């Protein structure tokens, strides 16, 4: 991005290919209070309760919590109902037929679910999605009274729920994996999955209480269905008070990556773009397919066929409690900061593979004890009072634990591939669509009375094989960080649209200022360089200005630490600084922060004064350090382009260098800034210098008088520079005064720095294999 980024509310430079538009809504960091200044209104108002400051309403945490409660009331109750086997009916055939219609429709609509979410917004999509659950349950209640007379309505209700569920789950998944930052995605899954499954837990208490004295396998009572229906419709209404994604502001002031002006055409094309961006996601499709396949076996074959009515309700309760515990454990482990994300992904895959054989190996032992034929006997139902209940009970609990671990891993894998809300919506659409195709087939197989043994084997083989097929994605494509430029690909948003617009200011937070480390996400200074006294702060992972230096100075020892950072999305992540402070046993409140912008082109660079020459912290004087430009680009993919030139015939090497450095630089300097060039450098070579390389047996020497070097975020940036009228009419004309254009040669590549500023570089954002 350009170093002269416009202030909040100003227009972006029209020729900047990345800066299409700036939002008028600004999230500003206020140094005097240590908080982000957000737009006015109820969505961004904060309240303190018992000394704790709540997030604003339009924050990721609050919104995900509300979505979790919507799912708590809609699919959570649906899970509780179906967890009893057959939707609470003794004969599971009707519900199997309804679910076949449901998941067949879900598979088709879900594949395009991301398109609807991106076009309609998460609020309307969730509200519409919740309605189908209530209608589905109404149809089952009517069946208990009118039998096959309402069969057509039952199937239509299944189809309607397929459409509604596709909408709801795609919107939910988009929020869960695109709202949080990269280091929070496992925690957000754990939080959501726990609240969501509390719905199934509480829903399981309804049939348990209503059928506590029913020791045989019978249909559940009308009151059970009515309770479910009321809660489901309330959940649909709750979705209407959510905020849409374009209103969400994270704590650091950054926005969710979306399309500002989505159309149906752009969103359907976005499906293709998602596959083109990361074709390896296809290797995750078998995991998607199997992620709901096992529900039919677990709920109908294990719980529905093997246990009495009240024991089914108890098992369902334990099953969903196990999911809550697994979500909390698995979500925490997936975000474990002591391991790099790529390492965590590999470990998660391996552990899940081992669990597949341990849990389903136990299931194999249990399945050998009964068949479909023996389960249909009049006296075949196991009650919690029976001696053989404990073993199958624990197996069903482990099935629930395994399910949550599987779902958490799949969601986390998708979140690791992208942070873009638009792309994540399409990933979730693929996931839910393919998942539902598997569920439709699984329900149909059970409706066709396929043997219990065959259903068990299909589950075990499919789960194990899908993990093996997914391994190339996990081992080759999941990186420690996804760059912001990659997330913005395929959208019409820019860094300026999603980044916080920060007030360039300095101030004093007060003598007694003290905050925990994670209370700070953003601080930015683009005006005269200043040290912010007594302010413990961190940089946001999403900054609009690149190439800068962090200077932390200890308030007690005056020690200064300098960290160069050309990729704020990698080096400046919150977890990085937390780990750094812990490693050095430092507290954030002991540090002062200053930002030193990169000098754009450069001629003379003042040398920094010694640390001891710094002014006292309380004076907030201009920082005496001037950061020397560096080409250390190890933490992001920055394109490094070199253009080699020879001087125009008739001028000397001295005239060539003098004109290029003194005259042409004045003409072209602002042009490079306007296009967001990270760095522009002139490389001057004279015949005398080239002669120094000529040694016997040495390699041939390139006979160029100079080279212009550019570091740009995308190749589109460089191409846009070449097609700009100012370049064609002004810069090229001026180049004719000293350059022989026919001699020009170009090369492009990525920097891989090994030594920088006399220090060995060990952290690299890429590997070459």
Image (tube, rainbow, N blue to C red):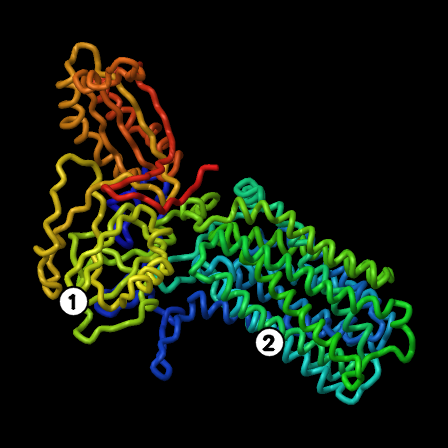
| Earlier-in-chain disc, 1 versus 2 | 2
Question: Does residue 57 show up?
Answer: yes
At x 18% / y 26%, what residue is drawn?
664
- The residue carrying mark 2 is 198
Q: Dot 1, crowdedness within 10 Å: few (<14), some or many (≥20)?
A: few
On the image, the x and y values in percent for residue 469 come to: 65, 47
At x 64% / y 62%, what residue is drawn?
355
Closest to the camera, between mark 1 and mark 2, is 1
Q: Residue furthest top?
A: 650
On the image, the x and y values in percent for residue 364 come to: 77, 64
SS for callout 2: helix
SS for callout 1: loop
Q: What's the mark number on residue 240?
A: none
At x 9% / y 59%, what residue is drawn?
615
Q: Which one is in front, 175 or 321?
A: 321
On the image, the x and y values in percent for residue 688 come to: 16, 17
Q: Which one is in front, 738 or 642?
A: 642
Please tell me in which quadrant of the rendered image residue 36 appears: bottom left
Image height check: is 663 above or below 533?
above
Q: Horizontally, is 222 left or right of 730 in the view?
A: right
Q: CA distance from mark 1 to mark 2?
A: 49 Å
Q: What's the mark number on residue 556?
A: 1
Image height check: is 754 above or below 436?
above
Question: Does residue 188 show up?
Answer: no
Q: Residue furthest front?
A: 696
Please tell me in which quadrant of the rendered image residue 588 appears: bottom left
Circles 1, 2 touching at the beta carbon (< 8 Å): no
Q: Horizontally, is 146 left or right of 559 in the view?
A: right
On the image, the x and y values in percent for residue 216 come to: 84, 83
At x 69% / y 74%, what residue is drawn?
80
């Amino acid at each position: 991005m350009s170093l002269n980024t416009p202030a909040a509310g100003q227009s972006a430079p029209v020729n900047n290919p990345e800066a299409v538009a700036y939002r008028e809504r600004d999230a500003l960091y206020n140094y005097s209070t240590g908080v982000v200044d957000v737009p006015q209104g109820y969505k961004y108002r904060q309240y303190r309760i018992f000394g704790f400051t709540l997030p604003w309403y339009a924050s990721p945490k609050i919104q995900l919590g509300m979505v979790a409660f919507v799912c708590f009331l809609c699919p959570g109750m649906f899970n509780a109902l179906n967890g009893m086997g057959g939707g609470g009916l003794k004969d599971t055939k009707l519900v199997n037929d309804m679910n076949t219609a449901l998941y067949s429709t879900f598979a088709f609509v879900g594949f395009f679910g991301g398109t609807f979410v991106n076009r309609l917004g998460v609020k309307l999509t969730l509200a519409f999605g919740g309605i189908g659950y209530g209608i589905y349950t109404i149809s089952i209640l009517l069946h208990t009274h009118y039998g096959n007379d309402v069969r057509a309505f039952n199937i239509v209700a299944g189809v309607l729920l397929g459409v509604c569920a596709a909408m709801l789950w795609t919107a939910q998944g988009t929020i869960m994996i695109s709202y949080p930052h990269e280091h929070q995605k496992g925690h957000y899954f754990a939080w959501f999955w726990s609240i969501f499954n509390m719905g199934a837990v509480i829903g399981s208490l309804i049939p348990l209480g209503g059928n506590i004295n029913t020791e045989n396998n019978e249909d559940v009572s009308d009151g059970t269905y009515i309770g479910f229906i009321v809660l489901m419709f309330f959940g649909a209404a709750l979705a209407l008070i959510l905020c849409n994604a374009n209103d969400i502001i994270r704590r650091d002031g950054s926005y969710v990556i979306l399309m500002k002006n989505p159309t149906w055409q752009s969103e359907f094309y976005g499906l293709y773009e998602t596959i083109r961006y990361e074709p390896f996601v296809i290797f995750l499709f078998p995991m998607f397919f199997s992620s709901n396949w096992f529900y039919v076996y677990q709920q109908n074959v294990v719980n529905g066929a093997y246990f009495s009515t009240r024991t089914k309700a108890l098992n369902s309760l334990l099953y969903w409690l196990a999911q809550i515990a697994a979500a909390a454990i698995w979500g925490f482990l997936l975000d474990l900061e002591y391991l790099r994300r790529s390492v965590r992904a590999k470990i998660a895959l391996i552990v899940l593979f081992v669990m597949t054989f341990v849990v389903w190996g136990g299931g194999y032992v249990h399945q050998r004890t009964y068949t479909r034929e023996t389960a249909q006997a009049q006296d075949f139902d196991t009650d919690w009072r029976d001696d053989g209940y404990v073993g199958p009970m624990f197996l069903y609990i482990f099935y629930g634990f395994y399910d949550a671990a599987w779902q958490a891993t799949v969601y986390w894998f998708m979140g690791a591939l992208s942070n873009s809300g638009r792309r994540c919506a399409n990933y979730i659409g693929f996931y839910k669509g393919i998942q539902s195709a598997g569920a439709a087939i699984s329900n149909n197989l059970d409706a066709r009375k396929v043997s219990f043994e065959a259903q068990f084997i299909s589950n075990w083989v499919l789960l194990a094989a899908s993990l093996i097929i997914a391994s190339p994605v996990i081992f080759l494509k999941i990186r420690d960080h996804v760059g912001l430029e990659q997330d913005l690909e395929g959208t019409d948003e820019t860094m300026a649209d999603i980044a916080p617009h920060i007030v360039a200011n300095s101030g004093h937070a007060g003598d007694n200022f003290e905050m925990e480390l994670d209370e700070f996400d953003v601080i930015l200074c683009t005006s005269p360089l200043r040290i912010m006294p007594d302010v413990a702060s961190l940089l946001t992972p999403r900054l609009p200005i690149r190439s800068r230096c962090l200077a932390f100075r200890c308030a007690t020892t005056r020690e200064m630490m300098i960290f160069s950072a050309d990729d704020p999305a990698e080096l400046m992540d919150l977890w990085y600084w937390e780990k750094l402070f812990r490693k050095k046993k430092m507290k954030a409140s002991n540090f002062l922060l200053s930002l030193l912008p990169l000098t754009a082109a450069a001629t003379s660079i003042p040398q920094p004064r010694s640390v001891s020459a710094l002014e006292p912290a309380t004076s907030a004087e201009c920082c005496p350090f001037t950061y020397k430009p560096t080409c250390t680009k190890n933490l992001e993919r920055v394109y490094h382009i070199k253009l080699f030139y020879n001087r125009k015939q008739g001028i000397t090497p001295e005239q060539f260098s003098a004109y290029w450095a003194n005259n042409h630089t004045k003409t072209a300097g602002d042009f490079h800034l306007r296009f967001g060039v990270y760095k522009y450098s002139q490389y001057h070579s004279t015949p005398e210098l080239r002669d120094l390389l000529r040694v016997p047996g040495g390699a041939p020497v390139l006979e160029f008088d100079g080279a212009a070097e550019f570091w740009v975020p995308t190749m589109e940036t460089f191409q846009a520079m070449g097609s700009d009228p100012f370049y064609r009419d002004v810069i090229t004309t001026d180049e004719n005064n000293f350059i022989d254009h026919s001699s020009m040669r170009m090369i492009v590549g990525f920097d891989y720095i090994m030594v920088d500023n006399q220090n060995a570089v060990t952290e690299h954002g890429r590997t070459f294999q």
